[in-house]
């Protein structure tokens, strides 16, 4: 069936997505002895829809998967989604709110059931969109982080870490969302630059109340929970006060003055800093260093706690005005009280970063509460240490390597990881508490949990069956940290953590783990990639992946981050519908330069849509070419040339892919297909052609492009054939005759045609008009080349010889043949005179401008390098002007 005249990507894409779904051609062969290549997809949130970050990440993964299949690898690429605890719970809660319902009204069990129903009806959007993007995952192995097998792996990991002393429960400062009523990980906090205030407050010295330490703070409302004031021990203004105390304003408490070179920046603010361990992470560390008490002023709703005001010794009537108010209202009341008592010295505008919940956008409050933590950097049993060593020893290779410094910097200063969340959707923590009434018999008491992968029947200490499971769920990142091996069946039948015990190692884990490559954005290098390395090494005794390719952000054409508020968001689904999926994929690949953000503009995507059209039209040309009469001719020069160029391209693409330079591979293919093959080879083939050669070259082009543009290439290839990476014929490439022929085509045909075309363009000679040539050469290759030159350069008569008299009325070009004269008619000459005169006028104008500048007194004050550069340019213009004047004289004589 002949190809349609116009390429319609939508129909072709829909067709191949359907075929791939029905035939599942991307499943690996577990019995194969071929080398393995494996990846796990960074699981998008089940609530998500495809955005450009997903599109870039998935496109690069798919290029690798298809490329390695073509190279003969047995490829496993596991897809899946993340349950996205807070995000999904918020979505369903908003749906409930529309009908006046709430999760509290439903109860935990009914609410979770409602979330599962939402997941079944709406949670598959992102997977269907990944299929539309052309992702060649093994979708028969699609995973979800709350699937039974993965949930069992999460329980196994938690229980082991707890009994190894690497998970503990403690009261500490965490990121708290007052609206969502849960702890958040650092990555779930979005920092927004905000115009705030810096308040300067007087703290009277206890020994001399007439003297003050002035403290600068952005949060005056938390001063009521201060437990010390810090100064730098080397600061001569204040170090004599270390060991003394100040009266904490608005309270009955006195607090010590301590020296702290870590917390205090002598150049910022007043040089004195309040320490509030219950409301600031840096202050919490300082509090531990100085053994200070912790006071938490707010309750979980973000309101001022009445009982804490009493504990903090807040005076009346301030206590009455603060009880139960919000953070912002509390700030107003405290500032007013300070001002009334003459303790507020100054208020200045101050730009600062405010942490907000990534879901509800509420301001995050550092909050001291009882949470579960993973001990990450313990001296005796460190999770971070082996993960640092794995990257340092290149067992895990970060690409580009420049990210190693960031990785080491973060990992060497890593804090224990808060893994508990006060929500309902997720992996409920496998810990139970005895709540039996006879507590005297229970040695565990209610504070010590019973940690087990399954619910215990009774309390091991007192025998009570009255047990309550911890209501918290695990941080989503905990389950996703196990993703590379939990998706492959870990821990196996008996939970062995050693990959060396084959009898319990799941087949996928045995064959495809460690995975080969992970592709990830830099923004989750620490929150996900580092945690996978730690967990992989701990539980499997192997790294989870050998290579991590880190891509940058996709921004708009001006380099700005895309956001709905700016109105600069590019929707990949709309783009795919407008320009075709292959065009979007090729654009993203071509712009994926390591360490550089992708600045995306629709014009670029449109350009690669034209590239797809070019490919389609080339296929139609071959289809119309049929079987030429000269099918039996000997080897043609341009056939040798194109094969040499093809083999160069294969080698270059292979090398680029080996270095994860998707951008280089895409550019190499673009240049070869558009310019070498379409612009030159197909044109050269119109002189003479062998259809089998053209077809073979085009077939290899489609194979090379397939990882980047799978839809159009699959359509143009035979649907039943296995696509393989083209091989290089070493004997052909190294044949001296072939090398000479290819060089001759490059230097004697293509270069000559290009130069003649340039002259035609400069002199505005119509493409339909033939020009005559005189070629001063005795080269024996000329008869071979002339048919190509005359057709491609639109040449009429050609005169050749070694000792010919140069024609008078001609433009000259220097080529590998020698000098070629392009004979000009009077009309040609007049056009050339007009062109040269126009250029001369522009040059004279610039020369006069420089001459005037050189003559001004101010010019002598300019830097020496500027003066030198200006004089050189002036001399250059004078020289060129004289040459053009001579050229004009000659042209006018011809006329």
Image (spheres, helix red, strand yellow):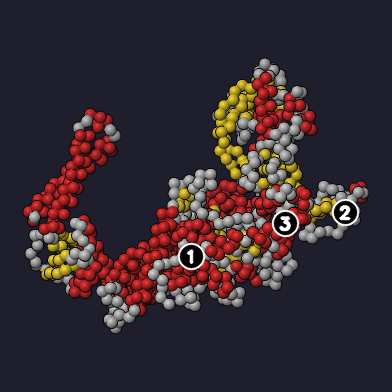
Kindly state the secondary structure of the residue where label 3 is placed: helix
The tag on residue 114 is: 3
Which mark is in front, 3 or 2?
3
The residues bearing labels 1 and 3 have C-alpha atoms spaced at a distance of: 36 Å
The answer to whether 865 appears left or right of 77 in the picture is left
The answer to whether 620 appears left or right of 850 in the picture is right
x, y percent for residue 106: 77, 52
Residue linked to disc 1: 10
x, y percent for residue 225: 72, 31
Sequence-wise, the earlier of marks 1 and 2 is 1
Q: Are marks 3 and 2 in contact (CB under 8 Å)?
A: no
Residue linked to disc 2: 466
Q: Can you say whether 57 is above or below 289 in the image?
A: below
x, y percent for residue 199: 61, 27
Q: Between 449 and 128, which is closer to the camera in this rendering? A: 128
Sequence-wise, the earlier of marks 1 and 3 is 1
Residue farthest toward the bottom in the current orientation of the protein:
632
Residue at point 15%, 59% (across, down): 812
On the question of residue 395 being in view, the answer is no
């Amino acid at each position: 069936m002949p190809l349609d005249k116009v390429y319609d990507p939508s129909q072709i894409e829909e067709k191949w997505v359907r075929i791939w779904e029905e035939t599942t051609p991307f499943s690996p062969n577990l019995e194969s002895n071929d080398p393995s290549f494996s990846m796990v997809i960074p699981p998008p949130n089940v609530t998500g829809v495809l955005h450009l970050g997903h599109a870039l990440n998935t496109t690069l993964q798919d290029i690798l998967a298809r490329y390695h299949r073509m190279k003969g690898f047995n490829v496993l690429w596991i897809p899946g989604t993340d349950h996205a605890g807070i995000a999904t719970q918020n979505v369903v809660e908003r749906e409930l709110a529309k009908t006046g319902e709430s999760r509290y009204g439903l109860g935990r069990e009914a609410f979770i059931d409602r979330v599962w129903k939402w997941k079944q009806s709406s949670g598959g959007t992102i997977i269907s969109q990944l299929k539309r993007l052309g992702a060649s995952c093994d979708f028969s192995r699609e995973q979800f982080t709350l699937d039974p097998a993965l949930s069992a792996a999460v329980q196994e990991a938690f229980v082991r870490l707890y009994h190894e002393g690497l998970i503990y429960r403690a009261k500490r400062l965490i990121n708290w969302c007052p609206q969502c009523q849960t702890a958040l990980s650092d990555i779930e906090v979005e920092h927004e630059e905000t115009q705030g205030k810096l308040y300067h407050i007087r703290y009277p010295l206890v020994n001399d109340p007439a003297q003050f330490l002035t403290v600068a703070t952005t949060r005056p409302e938390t001063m009521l929970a201060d437990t010390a004031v810090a100064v730098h021990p080397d600061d001569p203004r204040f170090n004599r006060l270390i060991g003394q105390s100040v009266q904490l304003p608005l309270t009955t408490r006195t607090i010590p003055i301590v020296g702290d070179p870590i917390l205090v920046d002598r150049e910022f603010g007043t040089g004195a800093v309040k320490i509030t361990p219950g409301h600031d992470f840096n202050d919490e560390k300082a509090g531990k260093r100085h053994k200070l008490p912790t006071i938490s002023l707010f309750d979980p709703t973000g309101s001022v706690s009445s009982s804490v005001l009493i504990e903090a010794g807040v005076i009346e009537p301030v206590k009455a005005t603060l009880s139960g108010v919000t953070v912002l209202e509390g700030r107003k009341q405290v500032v007013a009280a300070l001002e009334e008592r003459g303790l507020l010295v100054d208020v200045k505008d101050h730009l600062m970063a405010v942490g907000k919940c990534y879901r509800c956008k509420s301001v995050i409050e550092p909050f001291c509460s009882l949470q579960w933590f993973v001990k990450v950097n313990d001296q005796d049993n460190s999770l971070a240490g082996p993960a640092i060593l794995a990257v340092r020893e290149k067992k895990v290779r970060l690409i580009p390597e420049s990210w190693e410094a960031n990785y080491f910097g973060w990992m060497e200063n890593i804090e224990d990881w808060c893994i508990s969340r006060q929500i309902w959707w997720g992996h409920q923590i496998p810990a139970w508490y005895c709540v039996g009434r006879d507590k005297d018999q229970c040695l565990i008491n209610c504070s010590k949990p019973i940690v087990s992968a399954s619910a215990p029947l009774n309390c091991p200490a007192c025998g009570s069956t009255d047990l309550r499971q911890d209501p918290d769920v695990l941080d989503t990142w905990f389950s996703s940290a196990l993703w590379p091996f939990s998706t492959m069946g870990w821990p196996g039948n008996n939970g062995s953590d050693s990959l060396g015990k084959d009898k319990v190692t799941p087949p996928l884990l045995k064959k495809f783990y460690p995975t080969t490559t992970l592709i990830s954005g830099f923004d989750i290098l620490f929150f996900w990639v580092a945690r996978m390395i730690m967990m992989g090494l701990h539980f499997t005794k192997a790294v989870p992946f050998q290579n991590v390719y880190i891509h940058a952000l996709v921004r708009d054409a001006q380099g700005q981050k895309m956001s709905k508020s700016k109105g600069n968001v590019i929707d990949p689904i709309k783009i795919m519908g407008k320009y075709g999926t292959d065009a979007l994929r090729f654009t993203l690949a071509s712009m994926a330069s390591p360490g550089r953000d992708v600045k995306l503009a629709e014009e670029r995507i449109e350009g690669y849509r034209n590239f797809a059209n070019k490919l389609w039209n080339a296929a139609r040309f071959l289809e119309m070419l049929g079987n030429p009469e000269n099918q039996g001719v000997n080897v043609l020069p341009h056939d040798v040339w194109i094969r040499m160029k093809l083999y160069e391209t294969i080698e270059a693409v292979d090398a680029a892919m080996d270095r994860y330079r998707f951008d280089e591979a895409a550019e190499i293919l673009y240049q070869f297909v558009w310019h070498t093959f379409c612009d030159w080879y197909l044109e050269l083939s119109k002189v003479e052609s062998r259809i089998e050669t053209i077809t073979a070259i085009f077939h290899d082009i489609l194979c090379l492009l397939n990882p980047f543009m799978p839809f159009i290439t699959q359509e143009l290839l035979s649907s039943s054939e296995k696509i393989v990476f083209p091989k290089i014929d070493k004997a052909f490439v190294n044949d001296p005759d072939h090398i000479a022929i290819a060089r001759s085509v490059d230097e004697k045909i293509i270069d000559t045609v290009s130069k003649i075309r340039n002259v035609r363009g400069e002199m505005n000679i119509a493409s339909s008009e033939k020009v005559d040539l005189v070629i001063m050469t005795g080269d024996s290759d000329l008869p071979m080349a002339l048919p190509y030159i005359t057709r491609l350069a639109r040449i009429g008569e050609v005169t050749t010889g070694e000792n010919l008299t140069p024609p008078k009325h001609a433009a000259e070009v220097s080529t590998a043949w020698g000098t070629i004269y392009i004979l000009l008619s009077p009309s040609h000459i007049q056009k050339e005179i007009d062109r040269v005169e126009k250029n001369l006028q522009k040059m004279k104008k610039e020369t006069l401008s420089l001459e005037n500048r050189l003559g001004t007194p101010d010019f002598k004050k300019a830097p020496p390098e500027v003066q030198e550069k200006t004089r050189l340019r002036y001399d250059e213009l004078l020289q060129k002007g004289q040459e053009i004047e001579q050229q004009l004289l000659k042209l006018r004589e011809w006329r």
